[in-house]
Image: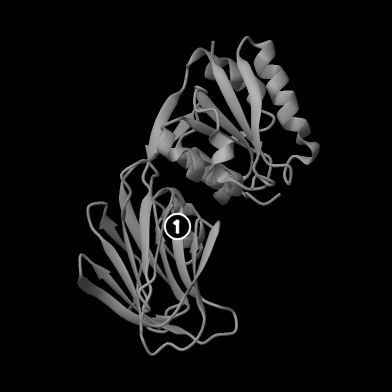
Amino acid sequence: MTKIAIISNSDKDPGLEFSHELVKSINKKGAIGYIACDISTCENDDRAGADFESDLFICTGGDGTFLRAARMLYKHRKPIMGINLGTLGFLSEVDRNEIDMKLDDIISGNYTVQERFMLKVVLKKSDGGIFDDIALNDVVISRSPLSRIMQLKTLVNGTVVDNFRGDGVIISTPTGSTGYSLSAGGPIVEPDVDLFIVTPICPHTLIARSFIATAERTLGVEINDTYMHTAIMTIDGQTHVEVAGGDFVSICGNTEKVMMLKVSDKSFFDLLRNKIHDGGIK
């Protein structure tokens, strides 16, 4: 019997009303459904995946909910699907009014699983400290609101690609190509390929441009050691780490990938057109 764990978000689903109804619907259709965690109040991220015997996970909320859930679950190789209760919901391909008709397919196994490329991030502080994390969407290195523009050097396998002044840089996966990277002028990339997208943020030059590197490369971002102001590295919009002059960020492909459950018959370009080109904002 299919066992489905629900990762909820009471900020998007007040009182978990929708999540409880989803559990009832799953059980009514002959599977086992239960709420594993309310992600908005979950102090220990691992609690959301406490029962790894579940066949798959459904998270209810928006893209932020999906990102946090995916970051919890990727090591356990469990399929995860998002139900959009927010606005754009690009990572959550199923809207709340579609789920009932999709549950039959999910329970019967009539779905595909798409592996999504992730980034492994290592921050080497100038004082010797080290911080590491993973990212499904993007890594953003940017100046704080009141600080001056940064001078950044980008490298691929140790070779300098560009040295520019600006507000920062975005290193994105294909999954994240429709997020901040797109707003900053980066390309749209189909999400089922493995590569990096590097996009400067408001570069103070005429020649700094977004570029793409293959997943086998190692990317580097070096903050000029004369930079005396505060800057921030943000990972998937979930983790924020202060960075400073002389710090170095190394980014490569992560060994594990996120397993995204796909039950919709919509193509990536259908979603792109519906959520971004045709309006997204309601």
Q: Is residue 162 left or right of residue 202?
A: left
Relative vertical location of residue 14 with respect to residue 240 in this rendering, above or below = above
Q: Is residue 29 left or right of residue 126?
A: right
> Which residue is farthest front?
128
For the point 38% across and 36% down, which residue is it?
115
- Name the residue nearer the viewer: 262 or 239: 239
For the point 65% across and 24% down, which residue is it?
34
Residue 251's image quarter?
A: bottom left
Percent x, y of residue 280: 62, 49
Percent x, y of residue 85: 68, 40
For the point 37% across and 59% down, which residue is it?
121
- Name the residue nearer the viewer: 278 or 155: 155
Give the position of the N terminus as an image quadrant.
Answer: top right
Relative vertical location of residue 166 with respect to residue 114 in this rendering, above or below = below
Relative vertical location of residue 281 with respect to residue 59 in this rendering, above or below = below
Percent x, y of residue 197: 35, 59
| Element under disc 1 | strand
Q: Is residue 68 left or right of residue 61?
A: left
Say if residue 234 shows up in the picture: yes
Residue 221's image quarter?
A: bottom left
Which residue corresponds to mark 1? 138
Residue 104's image quarter?
A: top right
Percent x, y of residue 218: 25, 60
**How crowded is the residue under tag 1: few (<14 C-alpha within 10 Å), some, or many (20+)?**
many
